[in-house]
Image (cartoon, coloured by chain):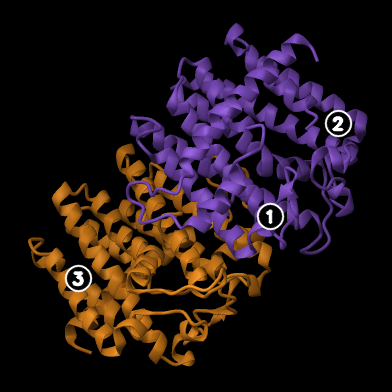
Chain colours: A orange, B purple
Amino acid sequence: MTPSTSTFTTRLSDAARVVEASLEALLSDNAAPGELARPPRLMAAMRHAVLGGGKRLRPFLTVEAARLLGAEGKGPLRAGCAVELLHCYSLVHDDLPSMDDDDLRRGRPTVHKAYDEATAILVGDALQTLAFEVLADPATASDPAIRSDLVLGLARASGLGGMVGGQLLDLSAEGRYGPVTMGETDVRLLQMMKTGAILAFSVEAGAIMGQADPASRRKLVAYGHALGAAFQVADDILDREASAEALGKRTGKDQEKGKATLVDLLGMDGARRECRQLVEQADSALDGFGPQAQVLREAVRFVVERQV
Amino acid sequence: MTPSTSTFTTRLSDAARVVEASLEALLSDNAAPGELARPPRLMAAMRHAVLGGGKRLRPFLTVEAARLLGAEGKGPLRAGCAVELLHCYSLVHDDLPSMDDDDLRRGRPTVHKAYDEATAILVGDALQTLAFEVLADPATASDPAIRSDLVLGLARASGLGGMVGGQLLDLSAEGRYGPVTMGETDVRLLQMMKTGAILAFSVEAGAIMGQADPASRRKLVAYGHALGAAFQVADDILDREASAEALGKRTGKDQEKGKATLVDLLGMDGARRECRQLVEQADSALDGFGPQAQVLREAVRFVVERQV
């Protein structure tokens, strides 16, 4: 581990602790204004789904992108937490028996195992709603234009034309809905929708909080897309290589289900080469942001090299 | 049917046609700006979930409340459609095998029957996201304060402290998570969360679109709450009375599952009396809005007397 990596992982885990505390506050049993009551069973299951794990990469990206533009404090943190809540909802639903049917997540029972299937569906539903509630709350940004910009961006990245659409394509890629042949373009679209769009939006949310000018926002979005793509290629490589013990979840799943990954299409060497190219793309998107952007440069390297 | 009722139902069904066309446009196969692609299977299943049925009471309330304040056109219509999308998502998830396990909805196969369970979960997820996307879109209101106000209100009405929380309470009321005794307060809270909050928000959305002053907004919200409560008591009465044929869905479900309803707690006469009181409450909340409010007065009567 180089000194730089060590500094980065310390910064990431410091940020994760702050995010954890903020998520814990958002998921308290006390009803927020305008809510009628928070059923304890639902709240406990939501906390199970969200708290106590994860690198919190998405809020980290939001907070660091905002910081690059001079915005700090509660606002960017809340925006990042909203993205994390959205991400956690997607994990809970993806794990359901009719989807990926996973029993473990981060080494712990998935929500439908720890509770039941109905509760898990509702937990995902309510986490999605809470993500939008947090973004639209004046506590996140006093300027309503920022709030509605955040909501619109998260909705587009996560809905039928983004993450949820990507999950549907992923199920199709298993051949559930008839035989499919996935070419490179299809796999890339699937990955960009399923994983890339939210990662890219994590960065864009920081740009929105920092009231970036259009050119800076475009650059940060380009960085986010490169990072999102790199994340997915690295995931395909990890999925092929890593052991079940190390990851705390089943691996080789894609192969098992006959789904084409970028490793199949590009070969292991090709996938590694693509990772390196994406890191370069991410780097050049950050040109002009000065030495403060170093943390985002390290973030994309972390994403590529991560061993969970 | 009195002449007034006949005029009202004509107005409601005329509005439903406009809403239907608007929903159809929102659910087209063409990706909106910022979306990557819309998978055809997902879109077809979303259209199955949303189009071709329903009285469209919620968007009607939004449009009519906005009209009462002088706001007309595309904006209130889009806001109402967002509430309807949210409502449709809740129906799709409520019908799932692990929830109410319903095969029919409006006389047609439910989404998990017509497609499959995974698709139905994703359809619900994406409809929720689309509801927020529509509200945060500048096409709904040029003023971002209106857009974020709509998002915040819908989120609070529909999430853990509203509709989703109410659905969890409803599952608990079946005794799934251990024996429960539901008193009147519990049943009322459950109903207010599960059904009432969104109906009340349908009206509030119109107040937001019409930029109501605080006093008018409070009155319209009070009207909405009375209407929401009346809807639920009427539903409990209908559930006890109506035949499966007439409703196009299974009935007597609550009784079957041992769930307490207001009819159990108040008796049939008491429930009918409560309906009349709620109509009066709704009426007095509209005092001061003039003859234009007649349509909303009729709406609450329609809700109480409806025979689907």
Quarter placement of the N terminus of chain A? bottom left
Residue placed at 81% from the left, 56% from the top?
B174
Which residue has dot 1 on it? B168
Q: Residues within 10 Å of mark 3 (few under 14, many from 20)?
A: many
Q: Nearer the viewer, residue B40 or A228?
A: B40
Q: Is residue A67 left or right of residue B187?
A: left
Q: Which mark is residue A295?
A: 3
Task: Pinpoint residue A193: horizontal percent, then vertical percent.
Answer: 38, 63
Q: Amino acid at mark 3?
A: Val
Is residue A59 in sight in this rendering?
yes
**Quarter of the figure with residue B266:** top right
Q: Amino acid at mark 2?
A: Ala
Seen in the picture, residue A259 relative to B206 is either above or below; the reply is below
Q: Nearer the viewer, residue B44 or A63?
A: B44
Q: Amino acid at mark 1?
A: Leu
How far is mark 3 from mark 2, CA to CA?
A: 63 Å
Q: Is residue A211 left or right of residue B85?
A: left
Task: Pinpoint residue B28: horizontal percent, then vertical percent.
Answer: 46, 45
Which residue has dot 2 on it? B271
Q: Are marks 1 and 3 on the same chain?
A: no
Residue placed at 58% from the left, 51% from the top?
B160
Q: Residues within 10 Å of mark 2 (few under 14, many from 20)?
A: many
How far is mark 1 from mark 3, CA to CA?
A: 42 Å
Q: Is residue B147 left or right of residue B104?
A: left
